[in-house]
Amino acid sequence: MASGIKDKVAILGMGCSRFGERWDCGGEELMVEAFTEAIADAGVDVSEIDAAWFSTHFEDINVGKGGLPLSISLRLPNIAVTRVENFCASGSEAFRGAVYAVASGACDIALAVGVEKLKDTGYGGLPAGGGGTLNPQWAANGSAPGNFAQLASAYRAKHGVDRDDLKRAIGHISVKSHANGAKNPKAHLRKEITEEQVLNAPMIAEPLGLFDCCGVSDGAAAAIVTTPEIAKRLGKSNIVSVKALQLALSNGSEAGHNSWDGSYFHTTRIAAGKAYKEAGIDKPRDQVSMFECHDCFSITELVTMEDLQLSPEGGAIKDVMDGFYDADGQIPCQIDGGLKCFGHPIGASGIRMLYEMYLQLQGRAGERQLSNPSIGMTHNLGGSPMSNVAAVCIIGAYD
Amino acid sequence: MVGITSFGAYVPRLRLQRKAIVEAHVWADPGLAGKARGERSMCNWDEDSVTMGVEAARACLNSREAAPGGIYFASTSAPFADRQNAGIVAGALGLPEDIASVDITASQKAGTGALLQAVGAVSGGLYEEALVVASDKRRTKAASPGELAYGDGAAAMTIGSTNTLVDFVAAHSATVDFIDHFRGSGEDFDYSWEERWIRDEGLAKIVPPVIARALEKAGLQASDVQHFVMASTIGRAVEGIARHSGISGDAVRDNLAGVMGEAGTAQPLIMLLHALETSVRPGDNILLVSFGQGCDALVLRATERLADFASACGVVNTLANRQEETNYQKFLAFNNLITLEKGMRAEKDDFKTALTVTYRKRDMLTGLIGGKCTQCGTLQFPRADICVNPQCRAQDTQEPHPFREEKASVLTWSADYLTYTADPPSHYGMITFANGGRFMTDFTDVNVGDIDVGMDVRMVFRIKSIDSLRGFVRYFWKAVVVRPD
């Protein structure tokens, strides 16, 4: 039985670029922006980094393939750089690579950087996906909002939810995230919105309106990890360590076998179950202090609250409307504004989520600071409800 | 006797109101004002002569096991000038690959030409049975007479020598290079000559002798013809030929101009099937005539079996499945007749199709054939080496299983305004097959508000996307909501 990742790796430093429509710079400059903050936070020299993991999703509109864009942009000292790509969970994947490298003892200090430059496409929304030589010959003509909107139809059918009730609940999710994001200087969208605005916004993919969709932004985030022992040796206090790091991938059963009802994320449930076990959490609703959810769309966040076992099945609407996930609720969700306000530069998002949890755990979140959080969780999801990559990461105070 | 053993028809659901066309053009041509009557059938953006032909042939074959020995596909609007269009139809029908296939084209009498070839092949013992499919979706210039007169549609029939509904009695043909209209290779539109000349110098002089000779071969008098089936967009021309040939005016059959327009090479066959469904009685003599750089005249006789035959979907049914379209702009857009801003997202369709993959996966992509695990019985799409059932995972156990006719219903759906489609919003979702299997698919022939979870759907063969840079049409299957009759 594997002993798991709990407390084997500490976060030495993190950085996050300003997210937004960064007409002023490309992916290369965004990486430097995030890394400059992270290396200063870590208090080490670039020469002390043993290896790096680098996440991006798109190739043709971003910085290209391979590990070279990171190595060249940061002028890394000829170390190993591995590019990882795992849909929208790519950032979590880069973090996992760095964390596993340290945990294995192969590296003392490892770097994870994620970046995506989305606003060089010439149009709004995520670029249309490719997907090999066979898929485009038969796969449905979908977009990200349309794929995730499918959840709403199945969730309503399963739980007998009226369309307007669901629309109001997912609307509240966006209102809450905008309220949080308004306080975050690094967020892209920094205006509070009203429920009325959400409900009256143009339709993107039934039932998701404009404000049910996350922004489309450029951004980068970075993490430098090491062992708790080295962190202490470097004089760090208030150390944040990795408690769990789990990925679960679809194997085609949701998409091809009639056992899945379409209303939830099969993979998130598996990844969350394993992560809680790895972290030693048995009552997540009571033990998780805060979390960052992969709120690419409001409906994703709603069903994920149940998949993460924070809300009972069929109970997320009530929790949302009760303010359970608001900044002053029991488990604040998207306290930084989430994908909703940061947008979703794909390769960066997983690390961006960890950045906020890390700041909160260290008491450095400024105006957004929650009182005494001990466990922060990130949920980073890529793909579509029927076929996806779910990453769940839990970090907390190192005892 | 050799004759028609089964048939089916397909007319697209959309019916463009001629009033909408006339209103758009009457400013320039006041003479159009009198033509604002009735409706013409109009393909959805994802339909063409191949997809319509597939639907008509599905209705004709009606899920039966036995396959014809050859397929004849007649059209002057086939999507490919050099790729066997009949072969695409055969693949979509799931016909075995050891059959013959022929495309017949380049004349408005290609439909009857295909029928004659099939009759000849079966009579001569080349095949026991042949499938004839005629289908047309002719593009027309905006404000052209054809835009008002034409329609889109397809007919299919099997030709065999046992259990015939209609027997072939005799035929006669003429080949005359009378150019009433033409469309040069690579040209988009027809170029037509004056109707009066076509009527008086063409139809009136070329057709009657062929009719006379065909009736003579059949040993019939003109007065023996109970049903005269001939298509023409020229007013009263067919009535004139009947009169000139001694055929009763009562025998002239409905050309369906008011309800669908003229569907090119398919029209004589659609009219024939319509007559078989509505007015032909056992023993009746039918004269089927078509005109196009010559003339074909076929004499047919209905058998007793016709009285008991009901097509899975004939002309009457397909005409009844209609939705009025009053937006002429949509017709222009679907037929690529205006330069439309489609947005950058539309550029994604212009990718190169990996033909190696298209071939390797041809049963999946064209035939909608998935797998059935012989170990656990799970149906699945697509077929894979390892069973999708998490409790099974057996390897190399799947036999091909067609999903075309499997009952299915909607599990999830959305109407997407972001992604590119020629007919926004794009409706798609997960459908589940009642006997097992599922996949995410596009919905077509759908209006906003039509779809909900649990609704029954059926699969139809449609255009998936078009690579306009290389002129390649990609086909796949989509779901349509089953509407109560």
Image (spheres, coloured by chain):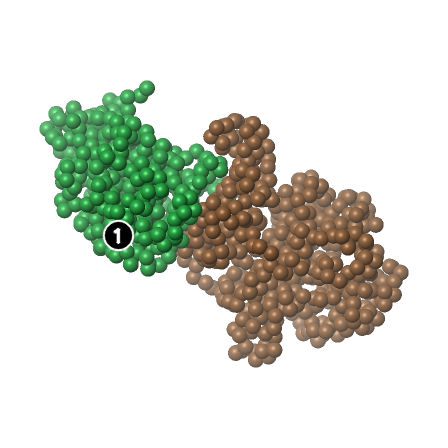
Chain colours: A green, B brown
As helix, strand or loop, the secondary structure at mark 1 comes to helix
Residue A70 x %, y %: 27, 38
- State the image quarter where residue A302 is shown: top left
* Residue drawn where x is 19% and y is 45% of the image: A328
Residue A134 x %, y %: 49, 41
Residue B205 x %, y %: 79, 71
Tell me: B484 left or right of A161: right
Check the image and report above or below for B40 versus B45. Answer: below
* Residue drawn where x is 71% and y is 49% of the image: B131
Q: Which of B337 and A366 is in front in this view?
A: A366
* Chain bearing mark 1: A
Residue B316 seen in the current view: yes
Q: How many marks?
A: 1
Seen from this angle, which residue lies furthest right?
A: B219
Q: Which residue matches tag 1?
A: A175
* Residue drawn where x is 54% and y is 41% of the image: B433
Check the image and report above or below for A67 versus B466. Answer: above
Residue A60 x %, y %: 36, 45
- State the image quarter where residue A238 is shown: top left
Amino acid carrying label 1: it is Val
Tell me: A16 left or right of B193: left
Tell me: A130 left or right of A88: right
* Residue drawn where x is 67% and y is 47% of the image: B62
Image quadrant containing the C terminus of chain B = bottom right
